[in-house]
Image (tube, helix red, strand yellow):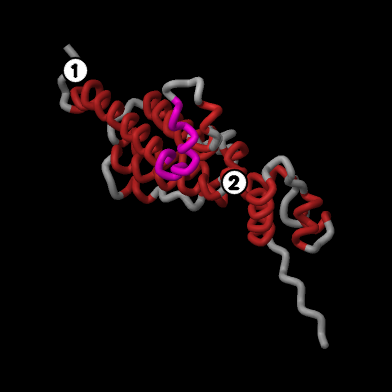
Amino acid sequence: MPRPRQALLNRERIVETALALIDADGLGAFSTRRLAAALNVQGPSLYNHFATKDEILDAVADSVTASVDVSVFDRYDWVEALRRWARSYRQALAVHPNIVPYLAQGPGRRPAALAMADAVYGALVRAGWPPARATHIGAALRYFVAGSALGSFARGFVEDPELYAAHPHLTQAHRLRGHQRSVDEGAFTLGLDALLDGLAAEYARTVTPLEGGTGPG
């Protein structure tokens, strides 16, 4: 009986397998040796497609970023576009939280990450935000989304009522873990709404008057 043919090694298969390993075991446990073993190939085979481990990690991070919906910036006003983009971005990161620390270092040379940064910045500048302020807004939203994907407020509390007995305002804290999804989703929605409401107020105060040709004062 003929032996089954080994699946062709290509960049897509390497990236998918690397992401699965990082999802399962964390970024710190990832190595090209473990990746080669998972792919049932020799280590040097990987370097026919990627020159370094960092190139593999860049491709993995970019594959996650590529799933974020940036088409919203062509279909909605800047506030609604930011809202929908932030939710899509968080969803993409929440599925693969172990890659977030690497991804959060910035876009580097990653194509999808650069395209996303360009879409966000471009939409804000087109809406009339000064370039420096558009940079601040993009950075603030990225910090907020990445932070929400990295940690869980609810998971920070243990299910031990006695632990909180000495803290009168935390007597129900042991219940938070049982409501992790609703707590974290509620916190994200509240924070995002607050950020966008604040930005909309600043926009009305500083950008709209300039667009209308009547400067402040």
Image coordinates for residue 152, horizontal then vertical, percent: 51, 37
Which of disc 1 and disc 2 is earlier in sequence? 2
**Disc 2/disc 1 C-alpha distance (Å):** 43 Å
Identity, as a three-letter code, of the amino acid under mark 2: Ala
Give the residue at mark 2: 61
> For residue 172, which quarter of the picture?
top left
1 vs 132, left or right, is: right
> Does the magenta-highlighted stretch encompass residue 138?
no
Residue located 82% across and 88% down the image = 1
On residue 215, the disc is 1
30 vs 188, left or right, is: right
136 vs 157, left or right, is: left
Image coordinates for residue 133, horizontal then vertical, percent: 37, 25
Q: Determine crowd level at label 1: few under 14, some 14-19, many 20+ residues with C-alpha closer than 10 A.
A: few
Residue range corresponding to the magenta coloring: 170-184
Badge 2 element: helix
**In the foreground, 133 or 28:** 28
Helix, strand or loop for the magenta stretch, by majority: helix
Q: Determine crowd level at label 2: few under 14, some 14-19, many 20+ residues with C-alpha closer than 10 A.
A: many
Image coordinates for residue 90, horizontal then vertical, percent: 46, 43
Quarter of the rendering occupied by the C terminus:
top left
**In the foreground, 46 or 187:** 187
Residue located 75% across and 54% down the image = 35
Image coordinates for residue 208, horizontal then vertical, percent: 20, 27
Badge 1 element: loop
Q: Is residue 86 visible?
A: no
> Does the magenta-highlighted stretch encompass residue 181?
yes
> For residue 212, which quarter of the picture?
top left
On residue 31, the disc is none
Q: Residue furthest bottom?
A: 1
Which callout, 2 or 1, points to the residue nearer the camera? 2
Residue located 77% across and 47% down the image = 31
